[in-house]
Amino acid sequence: MGCKPCHHATPPDVVGMLAGLPDHGADVQAAIERIAREQLGVETLAERKRDALDFHEVSVWQIKAALHAAFELGRRAAGKKSGK
């Protein structure tokens, strides 16, 4: 039994989407790297041009924890900006 076709008519351009994200500086990048390490077990987010190093198997609960950590990071940063 083969794979079901992807629901996308064409595969999403993930690299293109990431290239369009704003650069938030070294502090934000360091926090994102820390979330990747602590929540997803991903040593680095640098592209290393090897499938074994660039693709990771993670559980849905790890993804959920990483998204919660990133959301909390953003919430705290927004509170600091508004003076709360």
Image: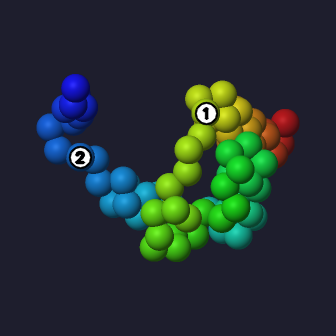
Task: Please tell me which residue is depicted at 60% across the width and 63% down the height of the picture.
Answer: 45
The three-letter code of the residue at mark 2 reads Pro
Task: Please tell me which residue is depicted at 15% across the width and 38% down the height of the picture.
Answer: 9
Q: Is residue 74 visible?
A: no
Q: Nearer the viewer, mark 2 or mark 1?
A: 1
Where the N terminus falls, by quadrant? top left
Q: Position of residue 28 (x, y in %)?
A: 70, 59
Mark 1 = which residue?
Answer: 59
Q: Toward which corner of the image does residue 26 lie, by quadrant? A: bottom right
Task: Please tell me which residue is depicted at 41% across the width and 64% down the height of the picture.
Answer: 19
Q: Position of residue 68 (x, y in %)?
A: 69, 32
Task: Please tell me which residue is depicted at 50% across the width and 55% down the height of the picture.
Answer: 55
**Element at label 1:** loop
72 w.r.t. 11: above or below? above
Q: Position of residue 48 (x, y in %)?
A: 52, 73
Mark 2 = which residue?
Answer: 11
The three-letter code of the residue at mark 1 reads Ser
Q: Residues within 10 Å of mark 2 (few under 14, many from 20)?
A: few
Q: Position of residue 18 (x, y in %)?
A: 43, 58
Q: Is residue 37 visible?
A: yes
Q: Toward which corner of the image does residue 76 lie, by quadrant? A: top right
* Colour mapping: rainbow
61 w.r.t. 48: above or below? above
**Marks 2 & 1, CB-CB < 8 Å contact:** no
Q: Which mark is residue 12?
A: none
